[in-house]
Amino acid sequence: MLALALLAEAARQGRGARFFTLDWTAQETARRFAGIAAPVESLAPHPGIEADDDISARTIAARLSDARPGEVAVMDYLQALDQDRSKPPLAAQAEARPDPAARRGLVLVRLAQVGPAFDAVRKPVPDRCDLRRLNPLDLSLFLHACFLHGIETRPDPTA
């Protein structure tokens, strides 16, 4: 929900906002936007929701080819890119970045799931070690990271 609020704020600022999901349907996403008082129509200039089984790093790059600097895009959930065995493994998708979003002035947020071994008693907020990985993935490919648990938020000190 925090990512949807981030997109709604980007749209209010006129920055453009897009949401890519392999987890929710377009209708579920629209309902969730409405729940934070952000109708999907507010995601101008683009409708903002991409919800289909064809999403991959390649399709996201293609769909963002016309994005303006400052536009915000969210990928929900990063690990879902690794589930379709007809596509390259997530590591290959993450490394194949001929035109990185950051260089073009885009903000690309990738949501990632925390693995079941995370122990909130041992540490209050997860870190990179706690991310669920179906296959090996070089997390240094991601410039910044922020971890959330409950109401706590912490930037990743290694980023």
Image (cartoon, rainbow, N blue to C red):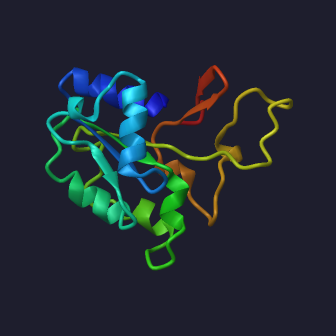
- Above-or-below relation of 55 to 17: below
Q: Residue 107: horizontal and vertical position, in percent? A: 32, 37
List the single residue furthest toward the bottom: 86
- Above-or-below relation of 124 to 119: above
Q: Is residue 60 left or right of residue 4?
A: left
Q: Residue 12: horizontal and vertical position, in percent? A: 23, 21
Residue drawn at x 48%, y 36% as measured from the top left: 144
Q: Residue 134: horizontal and vertical position, in percent? A: 64, 64
Residue drawn at x 52%, y 36% as measured from the top left: 145
- Above-or-below relation of 77 to 102: below
Q: Is residue 59 left or right of residue 136?
A: left
List the single residue furthest toward the right: 121
Residue drawn at x 42%, y 65% as measured from the top left: 93
Q: Is residue 122 left or right of residue 26?
A: right
Q: Nearer the viewer, residue 146 or 30?
A: 30
Specify the quadrant of the image occupied by residue 33.
top left
